[in-house]
Image (spheres, rainbow, N blue to C red):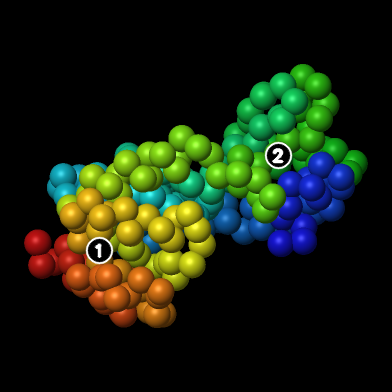
Amino acid sequence: MEVAHIDVFHSDPGRFWAFYGERFATLTAKAPNDAHRALVRLEDLGLLDGVITQNIDMLHARAGTRELVEVHGSIASCSCMRCGQSVELDEARALAQADREGVPRCSVCNEPLKPDVVLFGEMLPERAIERAAELCAGADLLLCIGSSLEVHPVAGLPNLTRRAGGAVAIITQGLTALDHIAEVRLYGDVVEELEGLLAAL
């Protein structure tokens, strides 16, 4: 929290990118797993209207999810906060390697580029939250997968589904504060549970 803050990005971009650059390199090497692919299959079958994620790792997009709401943004790109120029992550990493301070800089105005993720101290993107709320309010069934349901405002989305008359299913190994509203509560590994769901269809 101390380094992944918008104030640190502004005051010490070198420190910020020294911290974030390593994490981005780790994330870019990851591949979607069978849980990501199971959600794509549900979408292909017309049973899933969309995926709402707090993850920034690009894995749902890589798996092929078409209706994807990334409420905390994505590491897929970086942008200049002054002029708006945007570059893909690979280009940002190359720019960082070429900079003596390790900071990717805008080719237009030389300002540090910021990852297109929500940092501590920043507001969530309004359009993403609106779309997430729209999907949840219109859901017959909301699947909450692999989430502790602790980080707001996303943690409150299942209540939107319930108030609109939809059901909630929670699939995660730990307890959540919303277990009591779940019509279905599964505690197994999310890959195994989703594969079991697909097999039962």
Depth check, front residue: 89 or 120: 120
Q: Nearer the viewer, mark 1 or mark 2?
A: 1
Residue flagged by tag 2: what amino acid is it? Lys
Q: Is residue 63 visible?
A: no
Taking the image as shown, residue 62 lies to the left or right of residue 89, namely left
Mark 2 or mark 1, which is nearer the start of the sequence?
2
Label 2 residue SS = strand
Q: Quadrant of residue 187?
A: bottom left
What numbered label is drawn on residue 114? 2
Q: Residue, x 25% and y 63% (percent of image)? A: 168
Image coordinates of residue 13 in percent, x first then y, are 83, 45
Residue flagged by tag 1: what amino acid is it? Val
Q: Mark 1 to mark 2: distance in Å? A: 36 Å
Image coordinates of residue 140 in percent, x first then y, are 17, 53
Taking the image as shown, residue 165 lies to the left or right of residue 91, namely left
Label 1 residue SS = strand
Image coordinates of residue 81 in percent, x first then y, are 72, 30
Depth check, front residue: 59 or 80: 80
Q: Residue, x 67% and y 53% (percent of image)? A: 120
Task: Read off the residue under disc 1.
Answer: 168
Quadrant that contains the N terminus: bottom right
